[in-house]
Image (cartoon, helix red, strand yellow):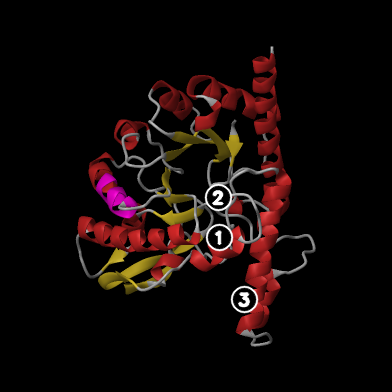
Amino acid sequence: MLRSTLAGSYPRVSDAPLPVNLRQMLHKHDRREISDAELEHAYEATITRIVNEQESAGIDLLTDGQIRWDDLLTPITRQLDGAKPGGLLRYFDNNVYYRHPVIQGPIRWRGPATVDDYRTAAGATRRPVKAVLPGPITYAVLAEDRAYKNFEMLARAVSEALHQEALALQEAGAPLIQIDEPALGGQPARLALARACMETIARGLKTKVGIATYFKPVQEIWTGLRAFPVQVWQVDVADRPAQLDMVLNAPPDGEVVFGCMDARNTRLEERDTLARTLERATDRLGADRVWASPNAGLEFLPHATAQKKMARLAEAVGAVNGRTAGTAAR
């Protein structure tokens, strides 16, 4: 059966009234009008709401929405000895910013950064919830390295820390740990290092590991990328439709998440357009190996638009599954 998931992030706030307004609670906390415990309750309530919204939309594999994440890197940076969040820089070609990690000394993992929110999300649903972590290549590309002054050494040190985080997520019950590598596209010279880092992260893990690519094209590195030691590959086919044929003509030996919905455009895709893309994928690979997803995090969209996109994605998945079941019955 074809299934659906999200790339990871989700809008934290909404223009519509919500039971808990996280933005207001953060402002109140800054003004010392509420306690740390009250803010923590607001975070947990927001994660629960986001999980429930994904369920209501019909998404199969959920995320915690990454609502506590200022950006892809900062949650991990805050739990690393030898690193600190730096100034704001533009995040790829998006109209959002991230705090670039400043590497001041040897990287050491000092405790889980993502496990508590994962547990909150998993405890709010009976559906599976995946975990998401930044990839070591992306982390090293976006960091300011004052310590190692060597890209490979930094990436390998980060991968060791991410291995510890992955072990903690596995212990918390994550069925899939997705490693986001938006900076890997167009980097053939770093592909061997990226694979070695992925081997480090996945070392000894029994849970599934996936790699997610977006923002940049991966045609140039696909031959090597599809041989990575992972079980799930996420590829953007919305912004880069040629990558659909790339995957179908040379599929990896595992599951593929097709990013068939544009997460950076408010235009709502037609159900049948999405379904045709997904039918091509399921016809070639088999429905059990195919997932449907936005091509990146939904945090770039207004909350109401994100909800409509999720529902439309689930509609398209349902249409494909319905046609498949009908064909089998005949």
Above or below — where is 42 with respect to 262? Answer: below
What kind of element bears circle 3? helix
Query: Which residue lies at the image location 63% right of the left edge and 29% below the top edge?
Result: 274
Q: Callout 2: few (<14), some (14-19), or many (20+) C-alpha neighbours within 10 Å?
A: many
Say whether disc 2 or disc 1 marks the residue closer to the N-terminus: 1
Q: Which residue is mark 3?
A: 40
Q: Main secondary structure of the magenta part?
A: helix
Asked whether the beta carbons under mark 2 and mark 1 sit within 8 Å of each other, the answer is: yes
Nearer to us in this view, 274 or 45? 45
What kind of element bears circle 2? loop
Q: Which residue is mark 2?
A: 297
Q: Which mark is residue 215?
A: none
Nearer to us in this view, 161 or 221? 161
Q: If the image is split into quadrants, where does the N terminus sit? A: top right
Q: Give the image location of residue 217, x and y in percent.
A: 40, 37
Instruction: Write the start and end of the magenta stretch as one range.
Output: 195-202
Q: Which mark is residue 66?
A: 1
Query: Which residue type carries mark 1?
Result: Gln
